[in-house]
Image (cartoon, rainbow, N blue to C red):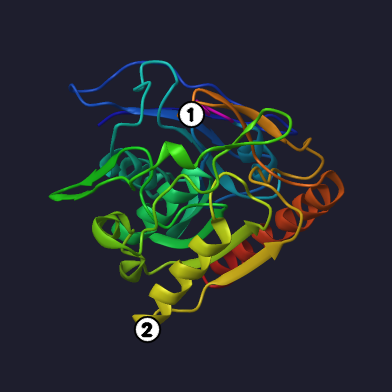
Amino acid sequence: MGARFADRAASGIPSGQSSPGTSDGVQSLLGTCAMFHSKPGPFPGIVDIYGVGSGLLEQRASLLAGKGFAVMALAYHNYEDLPKGLEILHLDYFEEAVNYLLDHPQVKGPGVGLLGSSKGGELCLSMASFLKGITASVIINGSVAIVGGALHYKDEMLPPLGIDPSRIRLTKDGLRDILHVLNSPLEGADQKSFIPVERAESAFLFLVGQDDRNWKSEFFANEASKCLQAHGREKPQIICYPGTGHYIEPPYFPMCRASLHVFVGGPVIWGGEPRAHAMAQVDAWKQLQTFFHKHLVEKS
């Protein structure tokens, strides 16, 4: 599998752009690896993954690179020649991204960190559970079960959670509220969708918006914590933010109250109250940096 990353950095905020193509008939990686080259390396490495419909988003990776990390902004669908849909995802693609960082001469080992929001948080939780070399994982409003399409890794497959569209509600503004659409991953056949977090060797930080209207992020974080502790793993850190919606971005990014949802095919509400959400973004940004410094720098 070939890597299609550009390592780029200016004297200030790093930026970059990958080039299209495939290697040996296998989908090769698409993304940007951002580093702050005005400082001597190697740097602690982080794979940064956004949610559904994101394509390649580099802003968070660039900002983190400015804080002394080597950050790979990874696209996994809806970008260049990557698949448009999410019916099937292969974790081997994400494993290649981890190995790319681990093998990079400017990345400090022995492990790397993961940072994921929404679907990206679900993928990071899956990566930490199945893959080696993951030291620290920050999950921002992620699911503890597979959503939207099956996840494959080697000879294992996790099916997506069942959904019931009849549970969609309309707000007074005519926006769709999809909070209750997903089935519970604790019941019946949907238990097969639960990510085997007990396999993970990573430390975890869950950042949760308590007004997330996309799905039940606080419930998911607590269930992941229960599973980890039941299997003798380290208790994860969970930070909950009242009045905070689904998209927790770096500080001073505007709150996204509602937008088009790729799966739903219409506008949905994401939750959040502007002041509380803005304050949460400032704190969450500090918390995730502290967490990565603790586990990728101080313990390495």
Q: In this orientation, does residue 132 appear?
A: no
Real-space CA distance between mark 1 and mark 2, rounded to the nearest whole angstrom: 38 Å
Q: Magenta residues: mostly which secondary structure? A: loop
Tell me the residue at 46%/44% (across/down).
181
Q: Amino acid at mark 2?
A: Gly
Tell me where residue 296 sits by quadrant.
bottom right
Along the viewing direction, whichever of 272 and 137 lies nearer the viewer: 272
Tell me where residue 263 sits by quadrant.
top left
Q: Which mark is residue 180?
A: none
Numbered disc 2: secondary structure: loop
Tell me the residue at 62%/46% (across/down).
213
Vertical position of residue 237 compared to residue 163: above or below: below
* Residue with the mark numbered 1: 264
Which image quadrant: the N terminus? Answer: top left
In the image, 210: left or right of 203?
Answer: right
- Category of crowding for the residue at label 2, using alpha-carbon neighbours closer than 10 angstroms: few (below 14), some (14–19), many (at least 20): few
Vertical position of residue 83 compared to residue 71: above or below: above
Tell me the residue at 66%/66% (across/down).
239
Direction right: furthest residue: 275
Residue 251: horizontal and vertical position, in percent?
A: 78, 45
Residue 210: horizontal and vertical position, in percent?
A: 67, 58
* Residue with the mark numbered 2: 232
- Magenta residues span 53-57
Residue 154: horizontal and vertical position, in percent?
A: 16, 48
Vertical position of residue 19 compared to residue 257: above or below: above
Assess whether residue 196 is covered by the magenta stretch.
Answer: no
Q: Amino acid at mark 1?
A: Val
